[in-house]
Image (cartoon, rainbow, N blue to C red):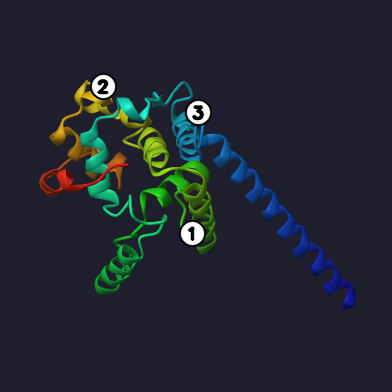
Amino acid sequence: MKGVLRRLGWALLLLVALLLVWQGWVFARVVWWSHNDPASTSFMRLRLDELQQKRPAFTLRHQWVPYERISIHLKRAVIAAEDDRFVDHDGFDWEGIQRAMEKNQKKGKAVSGGSTISQQLAKNLFLSPSRSYFRKAQEAIITVMIETVWSKRRILEVYLNVAEWGEGIFGCEAAAQRYFQVSASRLGPAEAARLAVMLPNPRRYEKRFGARLAAQAERVRARMIHSPVP
């Protein structure tokens, strides 16, 4: 019995050590990316692997653009649609989480997540779309790292450059070129609002942008003028 407990103890210590090494590696990447643009993300690599299983020669559409060359309309629209308290919170919108919980309870299923831009960025950079308590805990830890090291301006810049906007389409430049044949700097309010409402499920909305989503885009367009940007 003592031998079993001893082995379990060593296994637990090894697990804790591996977790600490992982957290250290993640934090080092967060620090590095505060001044260097990430060439790829966990989501990009996962999607590329999926797509290349069907089409081995497939390549992602992604082009980095600096913050100054991203339309102010897109910045406002994404904040209005995804995280209207972005400039004020510390990475977690507790009021939004409470509203999401109440909405989910009312519907009897998970229909709203309440994740902030910072949380979504943490997931996109390092994690996967899978859902589990462990992944949510890791997402929260990475969110704290990002909010501690990066400015809000940097968070929004990286998010807009790595967000998924369709099958194999990542970042606002590729999205602007794909859907409107313009650069990200030239997106107007209507185009920006349409891109913003695609973010929760871009691969689905790429194929079908119906009347309900169009109405949501109009609501975002009406609100986004009031959205502060960093």
Label located before the other in sequence (3 or 1): 3
Image quarter of the N terminus:
bottom right
Q: CA distance from mark 1 to mark 2?
A: 34 Å
Give the number of the disc on residue 39. 3
Q: Nearer the viewer, mark 1 or mark 2?
A: 2
| Residue contact between numbered discs 3 and 1, judged by CB atoms under 8 Å | no
- Kind of residue at disc 1: Lys
Q: Which residue is mark 1?
A: 136
The front one of 168 and 156 is 156
Image quarter of the C terminus:
top left
In which image quadrant can residue 173 be found? top left
Residue at x 31% of width, y 66% of height: 95
Q: How many residues crowd mark 3 within 10 Å: few (<14), some (14–19), many (20+)?
A: few
Helix, strand or loop at label 1? It is: helix
Q: CA distance from mark 3 to mark 1?
A: 24 Å
Residue at x 24% of width, y 36% of height: 74
Q: Is residue 132 visible?
A: yes
Q: Position of residue 49 (x, y in %)?
A: 50, 34
Q: Is residue 137 left or right of residue 226?
A: right
